[in-house]
Image: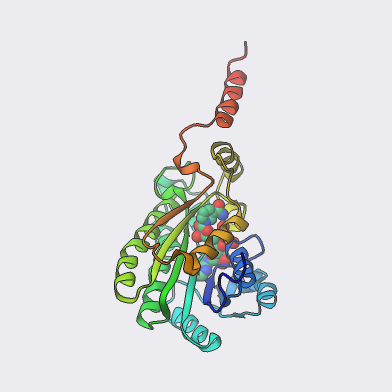
């Protein structure tokens, strides 16, 4: 299907390199006819490859730390100027935990890092929503999305304080989604994505085992970043106008599984190793 986003304008936060979920979304949104601006931190702009994506998608980069309200005003104001009016979609694809990076276990969290995790990975979503709302920067029936993970509902070994950030992120989508829907007919959702090998993903200890486990458990297999981009485009499009305040699992069925044939097979093999003969 083509031109699903024809005439739509947007802002995409969080593309770092070609593995990034936001990168794949930008490519797909461009393919489907959207125009948009790209934003990331000045550090990410120095070390990432965002220039390449901007060239490819004909878009302008606006640097911003998503925890900084003044920066966010700048992104929204400049985006409306560049794109010639209000936007129709916004992607929040932002996450970072210093506790994860520094391998500090959950019972021993560093609280300064913990606050940063919540600010960068969850409260920044509230800030984006607040700035968009105050500037009335999003058209009616617009769509604002953030990316989440099932650790918001279930405990996954070593996901650490990012689990708390994702729980907050999903709650913000519901709380703000009610008000934004009621007042401006703007929808707000989160997509809960399969584990994916990106820069943020590879920072999660044991990501390889996690990806293998969820692959075996999911009847459709893991969703990758390109699958995510396809799904995101539908949620930015007019085909999903009444979907709001939802956390939408995009995980090949993992979230509804308890045990699968493939996982049991693997588990049995390890039992044989544990108790030979
Ligand atoms: N990779 C996975 O397994 C997975 C699974 C589910 C959800 N997610 C979520 O998807 C989103 C995107 O992550 P990704 O996997 O594409 O990795 P990524 O590392 O490519 O993207 C994370 C982005 O966050 C940006 N960022 C960090 N601090 C920021 C700040 N202060 N202001 C603005 N931007 C900042 C980084 O520069 C980077 O571009 C994150 O919210 C992540 O938690 C990832």
Q: Extreme top residue here? A: 277
Residue at 36% over, 78% down? 133
Q: How is the image coloured?
A: rainbow
- Vertical side of 224 occupied by 264: above or below: above
Residue 3 location, x and y as percent?
Answer: 60, 71
Q: How many marks?
A: 0
- Vertical side of 81 occupied by 118: above or below: above
Q: Quadrant of the N terminus?
A: bottom right
Is 136 situated left or right of 41 in this image? left
Residue at 46% over, 34% down? 258
Residue at 58% over, 50% down? 223
Among the 4 quarters of the image, the one containing residue 41: bottom right
Is residue 177 or residue 162 the one in the foreground? 177
Q: Quadrant of the C terminus?
A: top right
Among the 4 quarters of the image, the one containing residue 215: top right
Residue 192 location, x and y as percent?
Answer: 47, 53
Residue 119 location, x and y as percent?
Answer: 41, 65
Residue at 54% over, 49% down? 194
Residue 195 location, x and y as percent?
Answer: 55, 49
Is 176 situated left or right of 209 in this image? left
Does residue 27 appear in the picture of this structure? Answer: yes
Does residue 101 appear in the picture of this structure? Answer: no
Image quadrant, ligand 1: bottom right
């Amino acid at each position: 299907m083509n031109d699903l986003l024809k005439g739509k304008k947007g802002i995409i936060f969080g593309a770092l390199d070609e593995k990034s979920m936001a990168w794949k979304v930008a490519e797909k949104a461009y393919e489907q006819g959207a125009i948009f601006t790209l934003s990331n931190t000045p550090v990410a702009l120095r070390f990432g490859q965002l220039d390449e994506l901007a060239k490819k998608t004909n878009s302008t980069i606006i640097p911003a730390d998503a925890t900084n309200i003044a920066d966010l005003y700048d992104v929204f104001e400049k985006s409306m100027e560049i794109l010639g009016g209000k936007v129709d979609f916004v992607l929040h694809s932002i996450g970072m935990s210093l506790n994860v990076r520094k391998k500090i276990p959950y019972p021993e969290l560093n609280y300064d890092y913990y606050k940063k995790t919540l600010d960068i990975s969850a409260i920044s979503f509230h800030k984006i929503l607040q700035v968009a709302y105050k500037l009335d920067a999003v058209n009616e029936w617009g769509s604002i999305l953030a990316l989440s993970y099932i650790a918001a509902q279930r405990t996954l070994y070593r996901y650490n304080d990012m689990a708390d950030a994702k729980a907050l992120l999903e709650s913000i989508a519901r709380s703000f989604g009610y008000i934004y829907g009621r007042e401006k007919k703007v929808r707000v959702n989160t997509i809960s994505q399969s584990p994916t090998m990106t820069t943020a993903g590879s920072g999660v200890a044991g990501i390889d085992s996690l990806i293998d486990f969820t692959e075996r458990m999911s009847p459709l297999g893991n969703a990758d970043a390109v699958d995510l981009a396809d799904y995101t485009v539908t949620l930015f499009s007019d085909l999903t106008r009444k979907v709001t305040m939802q956390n939408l699992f995009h995980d090949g069925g993992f979230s509804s599984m308890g045990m699968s044939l493939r996982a049991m097979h693997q588990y049995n093999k390890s039992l044989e190793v544990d108790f030979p003969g």
